[in-house]
Amino acid sequence: MKIAIEAIYDPYGGLFTHTRRFKKFSKHKAQEVPSPLVRKFLCRNAWLKRNYRSILEDRGIVGFDIVHSRSDPWFIDLCSKSRSDNCKWVHTYHTLFFEEHYKEGLKPWQVEINKSLIEVACGADLKISVSQWGHDYLLEKYSIDTTVVVNGADLELCSRADKDRFYRKFGYKDFVLFVGSFREVKNPLLYVELARNMKDITFLMVGDGIDEKTLVSKYETSIPANLKLCGRMDHMDVLDATAACSAYVMTSKSEGLPNGLLEAMALESPVVVPHHTGCKELVPDERYGYLYDVNSLEDLIAKTKNALSGGGTIQAARERIVEHYNWRESANKLDTLYDSLR
């Protein structure tokens, strides 16, 4: 089957990883629309982008058995128009934007995405959630019934991680790791305060756009001496860092089913995560990691200390990922669902 899948422009986000994993493990032929080559030209010229979109809106997406949307309101509308007896529409829900997680409320583009997910994507022939909590929330809040196909880890790629390679390349050992961004929902200021209160430990922040100027200007804070801002790394370097860290800490206010956490658990790194949404789903109790109250810096400090003194890796976490959150198995389930639409 030929599948047209929504293209993701951000090469560092969870949706991009989801696309990459799907294309790697699915038996079907998936093609991003627009293709990476076309996107290069469209991003350089607003007139070309408008005309390209206008052409697709007039004719729809043709030549595919399935069109698959995720988050872009324009593409969701396009999939709705492109659906026919010979072309089915699949939509995957990752998460929504929640107003309480943003100090100044949601921006217009976030409101637009939420509206499209709730009012338009609900009309897809097959609706998928990447997490059980997302499925339950959509059903209870909006009566949108979805099939759960969980996000997963690429275990083959994780097996290539090398903590010694990270030390040789970057020179860091015995550190706590944050992987993410300075977006408000990622709550990076809480991680900065954690570092400030644990002065004898080295803390690393890794991610696109992570630099001192951005952090200071956006959050009006200072950088403690034991906090190192590493900025963008390629994915293999991030996996090496995850394998090398003494603890992997997430401070997010909300998560779908986070790729970084899946990989950290697959690598048996001690994880410290907030007691909510996708983090709680992956770490339901302390057999698999350390859960803290996201509203309590004191609890985060205590759980991070517990992780650092806990004796190293957590094998049960890896076993949980292998058994329940393996991307190869998720791709097999997706393929079965696609086949059922024929």
Image: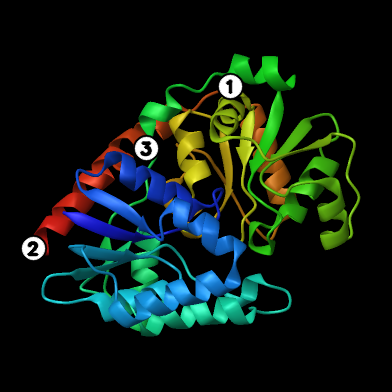
- The residue that disc 1 covers is 311
The answer to whether 227 appears left or right of 70 in the picture is: right
State the image quarter where residue 183 is shown: bottom right
Q: Secondary structure at mark 1?
A: loop
Determine the secondary structure under disc 2.
loop
Q: Which residue is mark 2?
A: 342
CB atoms of marks 2 and 3 within 8 Å:
no
Q: Position of residue 213 (x, y in %)?
A: 87, 51
Picture coordinates of residue 200, whole percent (x, y): 84, 29
Which residue, given by chain and number where applicable, does mark 3 sit on? 321
Q: Position of residue 52 (x, y in %)?
A: 44, 72
Question: Mark 2 vs mark 1: which is more N-terminal?
Answer: 1
Q: Please determine whether, in this image, residue 328 is positioned above or below residue 3.
A: above
Q: Identity of the amino acid at label 3?
A: Ile
Q: Nearer the viewer, residue 69 or 111?
A: 69
Q: Give the Cα separation between the discs numbered 2 and 1.
A: 51 Å
Observer-side mark, 3 or 1, equals 3
What is the C-alpha distance between the residues marked 2 and 3?
31 Å
Q: Residues within 10 Å of mark 1 (few under 14, many from 20)?
A: few
Left or right: 63 as drawn, with respect to 241: left
Q: Nearer the viewer, mark 2 or mark 3?
A: 2
